[in-house]
Image: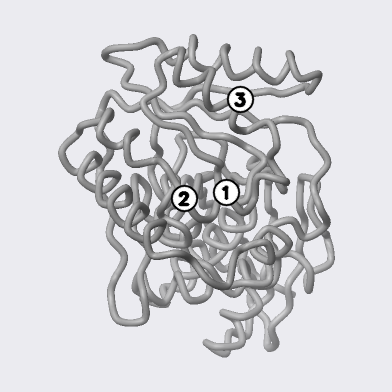
């Protein structure tokens, strides 16, 4: 008879990646929505995974980021237990809010806690990146770093650890998602649109703007942060996926947004607002109106920067 060993419940938030010029490097965690996973571990002589999921994602373990990460960790650490996993998808899929990242991170984080594996941040990111690679074709770290650490993050390279900066207290985030058709394996397709060569002036502009984003976060200067959220490389190459983005961006800035960007590969759009000076709801409404004028349904919400992965039960 199997005997209950231990149970843990973890959560990891949605995230917005790039923030304009910070392709594959910058990310920011959202206060909501989030993914949650419950792991129950039972005694067994072999490893097995009973996997359940609430949400519109694949149930097959070999196609689901959360299940895939759990299995990767179990193989690496030679875990011989029966694991019952229940994933509750709160982060919408395929809209540019780091859905696969949240699932990957919450699973790795929960496994680390329930089995007391002692993994450090870099190890958790490495396992989480396998889930990202499964879903998007590339093991990029921007969303998973934000989802794991919270706040504004700068993703690690092979030689540098990740950085997390606490965003300004008055920073409000307006997120709008249009109801538009997106390609299958959207992120992989979006990456295929990127140019192989980039002109030096555009590179210089992006370096300058990325520096402003970091400085604005560190100095709690939201207008400086927003000024830096101008991208001359990635967003330009993806405009055919987001043809209404320029007009939505213009209306958001007219309403008081400090900066606007496509969230990851889109189609969601992120606007940052200094809530001590301007009304985030007015910015959100202006973005929704812009889509309505184009005959496109859209939904959105106002939130704040969020915490990273954590144990909630």
Question: Where residue 74 sits: x, y (%)?
Answer: 60, 81
Question: Which sits earlier in the primary sequence, circle 3 or circle 2?
Answer: 2
Q: Does residue 130 sit above or below 86 in this rendering?
A: below
The furthest residue to the left: 219
Residue nearer the viewer, 305 or 244: 244
Question: Where residue 62 sits: x, y (%)?
Answer: 78, 74
Q: Which mark is residue 247?
A: 3
Residue nearer the viewer, 29 or 271: 271
- Residue at image position (70%, 64%) is 188
Few, some or many C-alpha atoms within 10 Å of disc 1 (few <14, some 14-19, many ≥20)? few
Question: Where residue 32 sits: x, y (%)?
Answer: 52, 34
Name the residue beneath numbered marker 2: 232
Name the residue beneath numbered marker 1: 236
- Residue at image position (68%, 88%) is 45
Separation of disc 1 and disc 2 at Cα? 6 Å
Q: Of helix, strand and loop, which one carries label 2?
A: loop
Residue nearer the viewer, 175 or 295: 295
Q: Of helix, strand and loop, which one carries label 1?
A: helix
Q: Does residue 199 sit above or below 62 in this rendering?
A: above
């Amino acid at each position: 008879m199997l005997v209950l060993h231990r149970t843990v419940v973890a959560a990891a938030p949605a995230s917005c990646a790039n923030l304009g010029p910070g392709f594959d490097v910058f990310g920011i965690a959202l206060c909501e929505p989030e993914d949650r996973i419950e792991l129950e571990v039972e005694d067994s002589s072999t490893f097995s995974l009973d996997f359940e999921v609430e949400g519109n994602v694949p149930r097959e373990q070999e196609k689901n980021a959360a299940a895939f990460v759990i299995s990767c960790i179990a193989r690496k650490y030679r875990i011989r237990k029966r694991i019952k996993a229940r994933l509750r998808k709160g982060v919408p899929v395929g809209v540019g809010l780091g859905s696969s990242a949240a699932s990957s991170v919450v699973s790795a984080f929960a496994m680390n806690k329930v089995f007391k594996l002692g993994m450090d941040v870099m190890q958790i990111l490495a396992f989480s990146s396998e889930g990202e690679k499964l879903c998007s074709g590339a093991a990029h770290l921007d969303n998973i770093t934000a989802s794991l650490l919270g706040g504004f993050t700068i993703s690690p390279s092979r030689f540098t650890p990740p950085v997390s900066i606490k965003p300004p207290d008055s920073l409000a985030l307006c997120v709008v998602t249009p109801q538009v058709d997106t390609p299958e394996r959207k992120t992989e397709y979006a990456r295929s649109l990127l140019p192989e060569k980039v002109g030096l002036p555009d590179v210089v502009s992006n370096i300058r703007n990325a520096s402003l984003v970091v400085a604005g976060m560190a100095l709690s200067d939201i207008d400086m942060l927003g000024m830096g959220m101008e991208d001359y490389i990635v967003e330009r190459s993806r405009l055919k996926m987001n043809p209404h983005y320029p007009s939505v961006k213009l209306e958001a800035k007219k309403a008081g947004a400090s900066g606007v960007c496509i969230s990851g590969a889109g189609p969601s759009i992120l606007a940052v607002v200094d809530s001590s000076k301007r009304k985030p709801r007015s910015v959100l409404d202006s973005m929704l109106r812009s889509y309505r004028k184009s005959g496109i349904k859209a939904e959105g919400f106002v939130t704040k920067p969020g915490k990273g992965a954590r144990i909630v039960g």
